[in-house]
Image (cartoon, grey):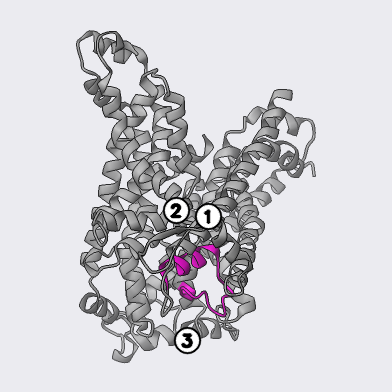
């Protein structure tokens, strides 16, 4: 600190104050206050807050009105996450591996075009796919190929997997870019050396490239996890706040919205909503910590051993 | 498979890779293309020949064969309030990015330039927001916004988006600020420049990084549905994403209007993306890799 001998370094305060104040007031304070609210109840909307400890959480997991909705949303959210892990990320890795080849012409054109759906809003993507799968326009689209389209978004068994695939279709470009950046940064000499030793393209991928991009695999997993555990827009746009049909597409995000904001005749309940957000917070925190303490630590140890 | 030296199989591999990439590019683009193309057709043609391009009126084209129509766009402009929604989205996005730019570069400069006690701790404090989604604090954000009398105003959205964009911006920008040569700043200090002047001097030196951070922040703000729905659902403060969502729900059976509204909402973003895709991709990779 150069100027500290002369005077109090006001300029440091001036530089930091706007960011710290806005971030604290509109992000950190609401997150903490929301966790606090989850321990309270209000007899009427806007009435006095009464401390009830963990009772709201207890209700979420045992009360007959709440428990089926909470477990339903939890299971659906894990299914949504599983679809992204099993389809989106392997597909992204495949596309990135193809694009990373130095011999592929028009690499940046492919990259830009495949990423395009990710810049459009989830609302647009939801409506576009709802239209394509709709019984009216969709029927016209598929009738050309003599396919009778079942109402994929109207059946409880198919709605969630289909919406999962729509989400994969929209977001696959993001992990693809991250994998691509990691693959490109692998030194050519490493791959050449393996090739000289007689390794095939297949084994170079599994034995050389994949181990080297493991940090990116970890980051992609965490980003997918955090993204899916507060997903909301796609379900709300295509299936409404009630996550039709029969709550079969209900995610934690839509449950959170319905609980605290209300829908149709049910009034919003801020403290129960805060409790749902608290559950989501714990799950996300657990996921991020698991990543930091297992994945990153293992990677660090491996690098040290190397 | 010792195919490395055989030219034919190398070509075959390349061809296969291209086929796979072309196939996936088509899957990625075709739904969007289908919507935009059909938005320029009249209703019957949308259902009868959904894969055909619109047929324009011209010499030699029978009047019954003309399928080009702007009726959907007419409905959108007559019944929707899109110019206003669009303006709101521009104000919110530019406003939030402006706050992220000034507050973010200033904080990043202070964290990278000065060795004060608590520097690392403050950096960590600001970094917490990178991983925790701001949506989880919505219950309290709504209360705060109502208490500040900011509900149904664009200010609420600007401040919330600024708060959620700042953590990553400060984190990435301070990495780049550290790479600015110290000699340059010390020379300016010897010449009597104030610390504020030195801050302002470093901004152009990391312009590409700032561009990436801005473009990377811009898209989620423009596309967000959650906070406009909860904090500013009033007609006067609606953004394009919320306005389109409600218009599309209301006119669900007017296919011309739905297709036109979808195309109108998508086109500005597609144009911006084509202009700024390089910055966006750099922002995406620099943000996550670090």
Report in which chain the residue with disc 1 lies: A
Q: Residue B18 or A204: which is nearer the viewer?
A: A204
Residue A107, visible in the rendered structure: yes
User: Which SS class for mark 3?
Assistant: loop
The percent coordinates of residue A144 (x first, y second) are 54, 84
Report in which chain the residue with disc 2 lies: A
* A11 left or right, relative to B278: left
| Residue A278: mark in rendering | 1
Residue A267 among those drawn in magenta:
no
Q: Circle 2 sits on which residue?
A: A34
Report in which chain the residue with disc 3 lies: A
- Residue under the point 62% across and 49% down: A93
The count of marks equals 3
The percent coordinates of residue A112 (x first, y second) are 46, 51
| Disc nearer the start of the sequence (3/1) | 3
Per the rendered image, the range of residues in magenta is A238-262
Residue A245 among those drawn in magenta:
yes
Q: Residue A300 or A180: which is nearer the viewer?
A: A300
User: Which SS class for mark 2?
Assistant: helix
| Disc nearer the start of the sequence (2/1) | 2
The nearer-to-camera label among 2 and 3 is 2
Query: Alpha-carbon distance for marks 3 and 1?
Result: 41 Å
Q: Circle 3 sits on which residue?
A: A136
Query: Alpha-carbon distance for marks 2 and 3?
Result: 44 Å
Near mark 3 (Cα within 10 A), the count class, few <14, some 14-19 or many ≥20, is some
B46 to B246, vertically: above or below: below
Near mark 2 (Cα within 10 A), the count class, few <14, some 14-19 or many ≥20, is many
């Amino acid at each position: 600190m150069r100027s500290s001998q002369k005077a109090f370094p006001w300029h440091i305060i001036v530089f930091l104050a706007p960011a710290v104040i806005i971030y604290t007031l509109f992000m950190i304070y609401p997150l903490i206050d929301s966790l606090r609210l989850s321990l309270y109840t209000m007899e009427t909307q806007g009435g006095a807050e009464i401390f009830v400890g963990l009772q709201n959480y207890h209700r979420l997991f045992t009360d007959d009105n709440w428990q089926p909705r909470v477990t339903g949303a939890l299971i659906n959210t894990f299914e949504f996450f599983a679809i992204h892990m099993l389809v989106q990320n392997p597909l992204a890795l495949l596309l990135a591996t193809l694009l990373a080849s130095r011999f592929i012409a028009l690499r940046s054109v492919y990259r830009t075009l495949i990423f395009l759906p990710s810049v459009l809003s989830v609302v647009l993507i939801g409506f576009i796919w709802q239209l394509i799968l709709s019984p009216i326009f969709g029927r016209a689209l598929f009738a050309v190929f003599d396919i009778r389209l079942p109402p994929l978004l109207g059946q409880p068994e198919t709605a969630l997997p289909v919406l999962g695939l729509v989400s994969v279709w929209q977001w696959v470009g993001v992990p693809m870019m991250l994998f691509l950046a990691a693959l490109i940064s692998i030194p050519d000499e490493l791959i050449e050396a393996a090739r000289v030793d007689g390794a095939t393209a297949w084994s170079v991928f599994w034995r050389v490239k994949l181990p080297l991009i493991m940090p990116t695999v970890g980051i992609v997993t965490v980003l997918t996890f955090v993204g899916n555990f507060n997903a909301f827009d796609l379900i709300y746009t295509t299936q409404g706040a009630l996550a039709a049909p029969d709550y079969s597409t209900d995610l934690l995000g839509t449950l959170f919205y319905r609980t605290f904001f209300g829908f149709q005749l049910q009034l919003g309940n801020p403290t129960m909503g805060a409790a749902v957000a608290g559950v989501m917070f714990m799950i996300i925190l657990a996921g991020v910590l698991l990543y930091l303490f297992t994945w990153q630590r293992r990677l660090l140890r491996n690098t040290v051993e190397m | 498979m010792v195919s490395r030296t055989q030219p034919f199989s190398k070509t075959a591999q390349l061809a296969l890779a291209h086929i796979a990439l072309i196939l996936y590019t088509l899957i990625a683009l075709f739904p969007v293309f289908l919507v935009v193309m059909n938005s320029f057709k009249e209703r019957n043609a949308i259902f009868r020949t959904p894969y055909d391009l619109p047929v324009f009126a011209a010499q030699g084209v029978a009047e019954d064969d003309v399928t080009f129509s702007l009726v959907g766009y007419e409905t959108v402009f007559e019944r929707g309030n899109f110019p206003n929604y669009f303006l709101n989205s521009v104000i919110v996005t530019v406003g939030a990015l402006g706050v992220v730019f000034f507050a973010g570069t200033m904080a990043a400069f202070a964290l990278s330039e000065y060795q004060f006690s608590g520097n690392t701790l403050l950096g960590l404090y600001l970094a917490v927001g990178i991983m925790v989604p701001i949506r989880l604090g919505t219950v309290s954000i709504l209360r705060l916004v109502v208490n500040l009398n900011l509900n149904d105003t664009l200010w609420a959205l600007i401040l919330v988006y600024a708060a959620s964009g700042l953590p990553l911006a400060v984190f990435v920008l301070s990495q780049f600020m550290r790479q600015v040569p110290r000699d340059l700043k010390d020379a300016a200090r010897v010449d009597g420049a104030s610390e504020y002047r030195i801050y302002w001097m470093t901004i152009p030196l990391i312009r590409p990084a700032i561009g990436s951070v801005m473009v990377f922040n811009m898209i989620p703000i423009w596309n967000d549905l959650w906070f406009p729905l909860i904090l500013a659902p009033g007609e006067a403060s609606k953004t394009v994403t919320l306005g389109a969502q409600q218009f599309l729900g209301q006119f669900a059976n007017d296919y011309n209007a739905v297709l036109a509204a979808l195309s109108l909402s998508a086109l500005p973003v597609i144009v911006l993306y084509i202009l700024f895709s390089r910055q966006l991709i750099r922002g995406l990779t620099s943000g996550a890799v670090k």
